[in-house]
Image: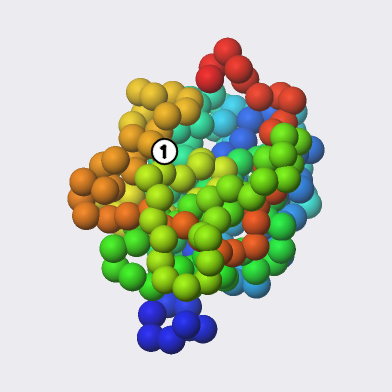
Amino acid sequence: MDTPGQIDFSATVVITTKDRKQDLRRAGQAAVEQTAAPEVLVIDDGSSDGTAEMICEDFPSVLVYREEESAGLIVRRNQGARMAEGDVIFSIDDDAEFSSPHVVEQTLREFDDPRTGAVAIPYVDVKRSPEVRQEAPDSDGRYCTFAFRGTAHALRRDLFLELGGYRDHLVHQGEEMDYCIRMLDAGYVVRLGRSDIIKHYESPKRSHERM
């Protein structure tokens, strides 16, 4: 980027979901309100609760792809990355939301170094603790971390695809750490973010058996 206030990247928000349309409505609303005007893409992993229909009715600007059979979170995140048009992919869970309309815009500015492959966006697990995680300790300099949380990160799409995305065989969880190791090996780092937070509500419909 040429100046601190200039954004040189376009963005796509990818939300993968299954049978949590009430949670998803909140996530979708926060995504379409972003000042950076990102493309918003929802991948419905075989829902049976009318998820796709709700998004089409309530958020006509959102792109929705519904799959009849469930293939899991990792497969759908990879699918979303291939479909996305943005230079930077923002991935949030369907039970999360951007706390302000500025999160995407603020985070895009943090891709101002060619070695930044991903940004770990500050977030709060609302139902667990008020602690803000993945936040840079101050406003000076660039701070790196070893990995990012799946519900609160942004990454360079071209690099993600070049490195093969997430490993499908992991099915559910563990994919972020694995990807970050491969990204570091390729010479890129995860930067700690300074944006407004993402709120993660941890839906009671989480599949602990799959995890």
Question: How many numbered marks does the figure carry?
Answer: 1
Asked if residue 163 can be seen in this view, the reply is no
Q: Where in the figure is residue 113, as x and y percent of width and height?
A: 33, 70
Left or right placement of residue 130 versus residue 142 in this view:
right
Q: What colouring does the structure picture have?
A: rainbow
Residue at left offset 57%, top offset 31%:
45
Local secondary structure at mark 1: helix
Question: Which residue is nearer to you in this view: 207 or 128?
Answer: 128
Q: Say which quadrant the N terminus sits in.
A: bottom left
Q: Where in the figure is residue 13, as x and y percent of width and height?
A: 55, 55
Crowd around label 1: few <14 · some 14–19 · many ≥20 (10 Å): some
Q: Amino acid at mark 1?
A: Glu
Q: Is residue 71 above or below residue 26?
A: above
Asked if residue 126 can be seen in this view, the reply is yes
Question: Which residue is nearer to you in this view: 168 or 69?
Answer: 168
Q: Which residue is mark 1?
A: 176
Q: Is residue 33 above or below residue 62?
A: below
Quadrant of the image occupied by residue 175: top left
Residue placed farthest to the bottom in the image?
3
Residue placed farthest to the left in the image?
186
Q: Is residue 118 above or below residue 127?
A: below
Q: Where in the figure is residue 200, as x and y percent of width and height?
A: 68, 42
Q: Where in the figure is residue 38, as x and y percent of width and height?
A: 57, 65
Question: Which residue is nearer to you in this view: 138 or 116?
Answer: 138
Residue at left offset 72%, top offset 34%:
128
Residue at left offset 26%, top offset 48%:
184
Quadrant of the image occupied by residue 94: top right
Residue at left offset 61%, top offset 41%:
93
